[in-house]
Amino acid sequence: MHRDLLDALRCPQDHAESWLVAMVHRADGTRLLEADLACPVCGAEFRVEDGVGLFGGASPPVSSTASPPPDGIGAAQGAPDVVRLAAQLGVLGGLTPVLLAGRYAAVADAYAALTGAPVVVVDTTITGNIFTEPGVSMLQIGPRLPLGTGTLAAAAFDRTMFPATGQTSPSLAAGIIRAVRTGGRLVTPVTPALPPETIVDVRTVARDDVEWVGEVTVATGGLVTLRRQPPET
């Protein structure tokens, strides 16, 4: 996981947004390999293991070497065309990451190499860091996204990141959309459509028989302000 992603991480528990405090145990340049993460609001603890941020989902990752994406990533409809995806998302370079999930995660390395943009892959089941580009980070997640409001430049995802039901979780979809900054783009397959309640603040930019492209028009929420409690008298 890239060190800069720490600024975007938030506690996924059900309370106002809060930064996470990090204790780094092992790093390789800008990449975090082993670290403990904790929420100062609720005390929840998370970790980075083998370079993967663990926030729920599958069992802990195992060490791996460079290999093709496993069957769970990009297997449902085949990997997307990375040039088409880059044009749809409209992000080149910068420091704000692009989220790729489901079948779109299969081109994370190629997308990062083509655009120069940092990429964060989120998944609920895959174990082990199978990506080789230094700009690609991986988060293993549960039902809530551990990224803050407006911390993503754009996002592309589909229902294959929810293998248990095969349907897009409204809460996780809403979390992804909330994390995309105002003016940032979303790419998802046309079928199944996103739950209507999740795209109230998103306008349609383009669509064809395969994919829908939207643009976030309003960002809501944000970090909670921590205040020192006055001493009891």
Image (cartoon, rainbow, N blue to C red):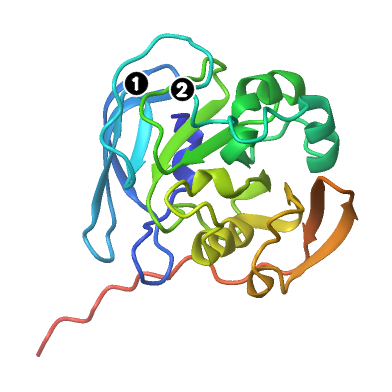
Q: Position of residue 78 (x, y in %)?
A: 67, 28
Q: Is residue 151 visible?
A: yes
Quarter of the figure that contains the C terminus: bottom left
Q: Residues within 10 Å of mark 2 (few under 14, many from 20)?
A: few
Q: Residues within 10 Å of mark 1 (few under 14, many from 20)?
A: some
Q: Amino acid at mark 1?
A: Ala
Farthest residue, direction left: 233
Quarter of the figure that contains the N terminus: top left
Quick check: marks 2 and 1 in contact, CB under 8 Å? yes
Tell me the residue at 77%/53% (across/down).
190
Tell me the residue at 64%/75% (across/down).
197
Q: Is residue 131 left or right of residue 106?
A: left
Instruction: Give the residue number, with chain letter if any, for mark 1.
Output: 27
Local SS, label 2: loop
* Distance from Cα at disc 2 to Cα at disc 1: 7 Å
Q: Position of residue 69 (x, y in %)?
A: 52, 21
